[in-house]
Image (cartoon, grey):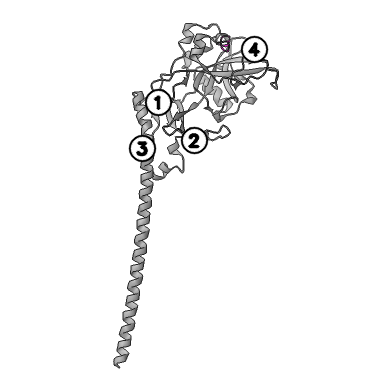
């Protein structure tokens, strides 16, 4: 699935990068741009940047849409607002997506996305995934237009991200991932002349390009939190135990160096072992410090005792001298 992502670029940089990615959006038009906020922690039901065909179907435009699909037939805001649309739901047919997949396909734009890995102790660790080449992630999406009576405006544009099964690289982390499109695939997905067809369905596949994936701080968890630290490997953050001792507990996983899911699982399984090594190192350093302090105390006492003995011997010598006199 995809339940949290990063889109931190300012409007002008986002437009330029989209053009560099082969999506020639109209730079003079961004529908509802005032609702867009660059964020490192984009959460469901907030507003996100989307690329779609304009109403005349002759130009790509950017529009800010609510993340969580509100279907056109909704009279009021529904409790269920799907942030993800499973590929099998589109293939099998669903009233929620049947109309949108024909004429309301879009691209949701991101720098990268977060996913939480389940750990053996029942806890979860957040990981950040991005393209290795630094390009934008172009998520296949659907959008819809609705008129809920309890919405504060007459019209509401909302979107959802299409997900599929994981690639061999990503399977160590989760059993679902967003559909990430390359330039040509994105243009095909956005083509208004193409109704839903097997050729479009084939685009809903695991991403096979090179990705970087690494553990990040768990502070990304609360949706109200916001920081550029969220996309930095957890071991590189200032003040972390591993950076203090200069021994990183884990390295970013890259699909260019990863040959199999077993290898990823192995890298992941090494983390508890590395964490144990960190604890051992800390304990060893503490013991060394304690031993050094103890040794200093002993030497101080020995020196003090020796000084006292010398003083007593000197005093005794002087007393004997005068007694003889």
Where disc 2 sits, the SS reads helix
Residue stretch in magenta: 95-100
Q: Is residue 291 left or right of residue 144?
A: left
Looking at the image, is mark 1 or mark 3 earlier in the sequence? 1
Q: Is residue 67 above or below residue 320?
A: above
Q: Is residue 195 above or below residue 148?
A: above
Considering depth in this image, is 321 or 19 the residue closer to the camera?
Answer: 321
**Badge nearest the viewer, 2 or 3:** 3
The part of the image, by quadrant, that contains residue 79 is: top right
Q: Is residue 247 visible?
A: no
Give the camera-side residue of 163 and 200. Answer: 163
Which disc is residue 273 wearing?
3
Label 2 sits on residue: 218
What label does residue 14 carry, if any? Answer: none
**First in sequence: mark 2 or mark 4?**
4
Q: Which residue is mark 1?
A: 172
Main SS, magenta region, reads: loop
Q: Front-most of 59 and 316?
A: 316
Q: Residues within 10 Å of mark 4 (few under 14, many from 20)?
A: few
Density class for disc 3 (Cα within 10 Å; few <14, some 14-19, many ≥20) is few
């Amino acid at each position: 699935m995809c339940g949290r992502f990063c889109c931190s670029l300012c409007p002008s940089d986002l437009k330029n990068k989209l053009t560099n990615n082969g999506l020639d959006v109209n730079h003079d038009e961004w529908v509802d741009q005032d609702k867009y906020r660059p964020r490192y922690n984009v959460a469901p039901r907030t507003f996100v940047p989307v690329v779609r065909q304009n109403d005349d179907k002759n130009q790509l435009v950017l529009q800010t849409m609510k993340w969580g699909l509100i279907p056109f037939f909704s009279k009021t805001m529904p409790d269920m607002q799907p942030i993800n649309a499973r590929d099998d739901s589109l293939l099998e047919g669903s009233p929620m997506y049947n109309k949108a997949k024909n004429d309301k396909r879009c691209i949701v734009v991101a720098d990268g996305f977060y996913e939480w890995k389940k750990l053996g102790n029942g806890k979860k660790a957040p990981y950040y995934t991005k393209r290795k080449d630094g390009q934008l992630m172009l998520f296949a999406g659907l959008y819809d237009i609705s008129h809920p009576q309890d919405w504060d405006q007459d019209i509401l544009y909302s979107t959802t991200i299409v997900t599929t099964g994981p690639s061999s690289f990503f399977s160590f982390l989760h059993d679902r991932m967003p559909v990430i499109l390359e330039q040509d695939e994105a243009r095909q997905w956005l083509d208004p002349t193409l109704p839903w067809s097997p050729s479009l369905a084939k685009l809903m596949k695991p991403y096979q390009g090179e990705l970087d994936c690494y553990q990040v701080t768990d502070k990304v968890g609360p949706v109200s939190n916001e920081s550029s630290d969220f996309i930095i490997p957890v071991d590189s953050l200032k003040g972390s135990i591993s950076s203090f001792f200069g021994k990183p507990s884990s390295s970013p996983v890259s699909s260019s160096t990863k040959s199999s899911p077993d290898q990823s699982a192995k890298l992941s399984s090494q983390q508890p072992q590395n964490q144990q090594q960190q604890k051992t190192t800390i304990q060893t350093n503490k013991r060394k410090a304690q031993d050094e302090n103890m040794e200093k105390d002993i030497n101080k006492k020995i020196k003090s005792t020796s000084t006292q003995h010398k003083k007593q011997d000197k005093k005794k010598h002087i007393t004997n001298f005068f007694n003889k006199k």
